[in-house]
Amino acid sequence: MPKKLALFYAIIGVILLSSIGVALSYENLTIAFVMAVVSILYIGSGFMIKARLLKKTPRP
């Protein structure tokens, strides 16, 4: 995975996980639950993209 793409996924992932904490601090469980689901889907998509890119790149 290119470093810029990995950095992008890492930063967005941290923002999503931080938003769960913010939602919990405001006692908004609905938003916290939605953000948790979005975070899991986003992180999972990052793993899927990484696997696809590794499959395309030839190994020495």
Image (spheres, rainbow, N blue to C red):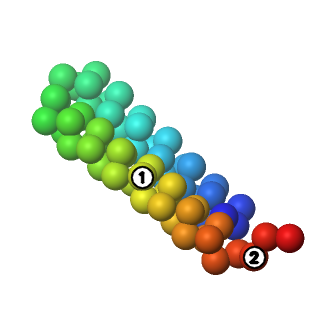
Q: Nearer the viewer, residue 20 or 44?
A: 44
The quadrant in which the C terminus is found is bottom right
Q: Position of residue 57 (x, y in %)?
A: 71, 75
Q: In percent of the image, x 55 and y 50: which residue is there?
A: 11
Q: In percent of the image, x 52 and y 65: which residue is there?
A: 49
The image quarter in which residue 9 lies:
bottom right
Q: In percent of the image, x 51 and y 55: which residue is there?
A: 47
First reached walking from the N terminus: tag 1 or tag 2: 1
Q: Can you say whether 49 is above or below 40 in the image?
A: below
What amino acid type should be assigned to the residue bearing mark 1? Gly
Left of 4 or right of it: where is 39? left
Task: Name the residue beneath numbered marker 1.
Answer: 44
- Name the mark nearer the viewer: 1 or 2: 2
Badge 1 element: helix
Q: Which mark is residue 58?
A: 2
Left of 14 or right of it: where is 21? left
